[in-house]
């Protein structure tokens, strides 16, 4: 599976993202809309906190509908950032007797080093969820003021996970 996102900073605290989801052999498979709201100014609380809500709509039975919520927790220690995101997801299961929504839980952990090079920030993410666990090394690249590209290569770490996911996110902040 590959995902491409365009994200728009609506305010200094709220951002809106639109994803295209592509599944190998199926092509364009789903659309996702992401909402993220930062509750505090960076460093104002002991842990920076944001809320995240995402809606996914599968295209022509190629992917399942989903609703995902996260609490995004982040802390900077000098040039190092560490984040943890507990995740709850409702996934629509189509069954002969009628559709059912299944609750799944996950955890995303990440770290990055902001002083690697003035325009490039390397990082690594670990995503843990049933049949989907993966590790994703990658980079944030500052292309211009308020324009940032996030590139990563997700590698499945269990047999049922996708063996490879390409991550490309273009962020435009206004």
Image: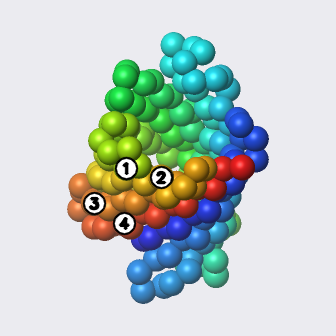
- N-term-proximal mark, 3 vs 2: 2
- Would residue 148 be found to the left or right of residue 133 on screen? right
Give yes or no for contact between labels 4 and 1 (Cβ–Cβ under 8 Å).
Answer: no
Name the residue that disc number 3 marks. Answer: 155
Question: Which residue is drawn at the image coordinates 54% and 18% (left, top)?
Answer: 43
Q: Nearer the viewer, mark 3 or mark 2?
A: 2
Of callouts 3 and 1, which one flags the residue occurring earlier in the amino acid sequence? 1
For the point 37% across and 21% down, which residue is it? 77
Res 128 visible: no
Mark 2 against mark 4, which lies toward the viewer? 2
Q: Which residue is mark 2?
A: 142
Which of the numbered marks, if any, corresponds to residue 82?
A: none
N-terminal label among 3 and 4: 3
Q: Position of residue 128 (x, y in %)?
A: 36, 45
Residue at mark 2 to residue at mark 4: CA–CA distance:
22 Å
Q: Position of residue 138 (x, y in %)?
A: 33, 54
| Mark positioned earlier in the residue sequence (2 or 1) | 1
**Earlier along the polypeptide chain: callout 2 or callout 4?**
2
Mark 3 to mark 2 CA distance (whole Å):
24 Å
- Sort mark 1 into few (<14), some (14-19) or many (20+) by Cα contacts within 10 Å: some
Q: CA distance from mark 2 to mark 1?
A: 6 Å
- The correct choice, above or below, for 43 with respect to 57 in the image is above
């Amino acid at each position: 599976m590959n995902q491409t996102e365009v994200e728009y900073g609506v305010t200094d605290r709220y951002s809106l993202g639109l994803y295209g989801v592509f599944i190998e052999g199926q092509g364009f498979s789903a659309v996702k809309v992401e909402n993220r709201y930062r509750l505090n100014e960076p460093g104002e609380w002991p842990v920076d906190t944001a809320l995240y809500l995402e809606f996914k709509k599968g295209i022509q039975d190629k992917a399942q509908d989903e609703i995902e919520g996260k609490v995004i927790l982040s802390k900077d220690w000098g040039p190092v950032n560490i984040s943890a995101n507990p995740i709850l997801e409702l996934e629509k299961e189509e069954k002969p007797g009628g559709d059912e929504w299944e609750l799944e839980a996950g955890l995303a952990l990440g770290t990055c080093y902001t002083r690697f090079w003035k325009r490039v920030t390397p990082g690594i993410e670990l995503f843990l969820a049933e049949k989907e666990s993966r590790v994703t090394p990658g980079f944030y690249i500052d292309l211009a003021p308020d324009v940032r590209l996030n590139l990563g290569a997700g590698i499945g770490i269990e047999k049922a996970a996708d063996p490879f996911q390409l991550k490309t996110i273009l962020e435009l902040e206004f």
